[in-house]
Image (tube, rainbow, N blue to C red):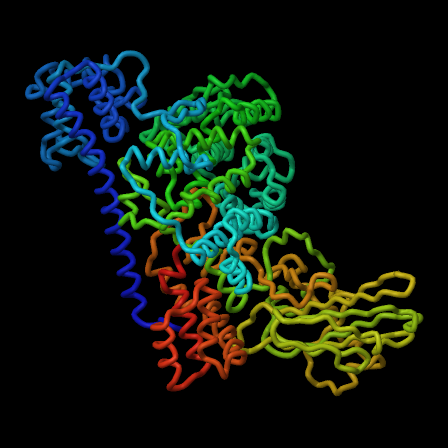
Amino acid sequence: MRISKNKNLLFIVILIAGISLYFFNQHAVLQEDDEELNLLLLKIEHSPTPILLDSLNLKVRAIWTQKCYSCHSSEKMKADLALDTYDGVLTGGKDGPVINVNKSGRSEMIRRLKLHRGNKDAMPPKGESLTPLEIKAIATWIDHGAVWAKGKVNVFNESPLALQKPKLSEPSEYDNPVDIWVDQYFRKNHITWSPIISDEKFIRKVYLDVIGLAPGIDELHEFINDKSPDKRIKLVDQLLDRNQDYATHWLSFWNDLLRNDYAGTGFITEGRKQISTWLYQSLLHDTAYTRMVRSLIHPYSESEGFINGIQWRGEVNASQRTEMQAAQNVSQSLLGINMKCASCHNSFVNNLSLEQSYGFASVFAKQPLEMHRCDIPTGKKIKPAFLYPSLGSITKDSLQDRLEELAQFMTSPDNGRLYRTLVNRMWHQLFGRGIISTLDNMDGKAWSQELLDALACDFRDHQTSIKTLLKLLLQSKTYQLPSVDYQSPEEMNRSSFIFNGPAYKKLHAEQVIDVIGQCIQPLYEGVSFDPSFHRLPSQWIWYHEISFDRTVLPKPGKVYFRKTFDLSSPDKIKSAKLIATAEHSHRTFLNGKEIASGNDYRYFEIKNIKEFLVTGRNMIAVEAINDAEQGDMANPAGFLFYLQIVKDNKDTSVIYSDETWLSSNTEEHNESWQKINFNDLSWKHAHRYYNFTNSPWGLLTRFGIDSIDNRFQIARAALVQADPLSLALGRPTRENVTTKRSEEPGLLQTIALTNNTLLHKRIREGATKLFESFKSDKTLCIEQLYLKLLCRYPSEKEIQILTSYFAASYQTEDIEDLIWSIIASPEFQYL
């Protein structure tokens, strides 16, 4: 283990760092808002035009929305004061008027806002106080006549719903639409195009972005030596055509977005359903995005898990009932709208009202829902309604008909939000920052609205092919620009953000794990979801351990199995192929002859055992051991077996591990227990602890006569249930929609990379193999690791340092240290 001491101190440091980062983020956001409000007040001081005063009114009402409406609105009129209507503001509360128009110095509101927090009259009494600048804005609004903007006013910005393809103001030398619009943006902001990145950096970046794997050394050399001018365009096409690798890699993004997982909350109660098969097939065949959305909104059995939501164990509040979850998930995942705040009360972050949220949730309900405000029933039933009535009204009575209506409205060519949201998410995935920074607030400011709308129109007009969109982005010169250090996430999230090129991107958990598995040693052998639908009838069996009339986990020690089967004519058998494995080890015999063995469940091979078969009864006997590393503690153990016998006439029969096998845990046997005539009447039937598709070791994708081969294969992390390593590296639990993973490194991730038991074991295994392969050539070993993990040769200085380090004592541990140093480096961790 790399780090084992002072863990309490480390956790304290992590906590302090997290708290500091939170307040720093809040300060940065407030500072940006302050700049905008300050500028508005300066303009009003110079020339208070009606337009500026209307803007000030919206700012003031936005302040009240965030800090006052929870007590003083039409929904909750504490002290009889409502600030969300002009009449309410002018009338005041039970203590009289709160503002004196044109005289802020004599206004009760200003007096109370300026009071010390400890004063009983201070406002607000709880929560975040108003800043001096916010109080000044309210006072300025009062002094200039307390103007109230006419008509229906959105407190927050709201982007137009429809798409309108923008027109270029001047010609461009570029062909790719991305570069055309970025070039115009660069000219406007006086930015010069930087030289594109090297071939080595490009191939690593595009491989990881498209398929989540590193290029092989041969692929790397072939690409670098290729002198054709369009080789990068061709490489993008080749990678997008690797359908299985593409679908497996992008499965993680969509699982995050659609809250789909292989285990977790809701699966125990069967109140949650996977959409993994439907999702993988959609990615594999590049199903049109609009078709995917229709299948999610108006689902069939394979895709219904998305809007079904999670049925939590026990009672939950009204804002988390399954219909409301469906509305929240659809709005956030597909429309870029955060509806969670408005599921409890009128939103403090956007223009959604509580009634709108309940109307949308009622679309997914069998009958109209009763509206609850802050979990208190109002007695008001809300009819089903889409968030954007201009696209159409929900008129159907049955649930299925309403969902069909909604699916049509959602995928309408006029619903620009659907297309903008997906384009913005894809841009964020490839460039490290969305065109709109906050992915769940598509009403936010884009650094180039023209680029966003142009790409959204292009995406819509190309039958919403996600691969076509990705191809457009990946083949652009913009994608090939050097990464830019934007200093901090706060800088990137500012509305005044200026795009200079892609941001540095941290590798996601699955990419880190897969590249290590690909280049060093596979971390996993089994998966939780197998897209190839590889299934065998074989079961993980063991001696049946019972304690107090209950089945318990197997105890450490040795157990035995026996299984007989009959053959009429072995001479007519064409092939007899066997495959077996165990956790922890096994020796397998056929008719007294040892035919297979293993001491690691990950490693197994096909054995042709035709010559050991006899006419009549045949006996399979197995000696298996559950390793006692855990002391006397019971732990998962199992034996897995499959035998396929094919005759000349192509008739096939199989023998596999199941509960018909006999087992014993008695060691008082001589070798006769392996023979047919051994008396096993005292033995009892084996117990099936796990089936083939569900075990602590996952579904072994290579375990099967037709699936195993000699190629170097890995179980991709996207197909594996989350474990402590992947969670520490940033994989979400997926109980909530996740649209953006953290890009910030942290001590928890560092600890996981240096102290995780599984990773430590696999790196040790990989280092051992490398040492055996390059025992006599240290330099070649160093070069191979650099090429595999970083896609470049080590520099002369690096070679000099490392060969000097290896000179003293070149051992497995030295290679292990080199692997650790590379995978922990920023060059490996970031694109």
Residue at image position (12%, 22%) is 140
Quarter placement of the N terminus: bottom left
**Camera sees residue 514:** no
Residue at image position (82%, 76%) is 619
Front in this rendered view, residue 798 or 171 = 171
* Residue 786 vertical position relative to residue 48 in the rendered view, above or below: below
Indicate the position of residue 776 as horizontal and vertical percent values: 50, 84
Indicate the position of residue 171 as horizontal and vertical percent values: 39, 29
**Camera sees residue 671:** yes
Front in this rendered view, residue 130 or 59 = 59
Quarter placement of the C terminus: bottom left
Indicate the position of residue 812 as horizontal and vertical percent values: 46, 80
* Residue 13 vertical position relative to residue 422 in the rendered view, above or below: below
The image quarter in which residue 616 lies: bottom right
Residue at image position (48%, 44%) is 475
Q: Is residue 791 left or right of residue 29?
A: right
The image quarter in which residue 53 lies: top left
Indicate the position of residue 47 as horizontal and vertical percent values: 12, 18
Q: Is residue 679 left or right of residue 331?
A: right
Q: Is residue 675 left or right of residue 540?
A: right
The image quarter in which residue 824 lies: bottom left
Residue at image position (19%, 34%) is 34
Callout count? 0
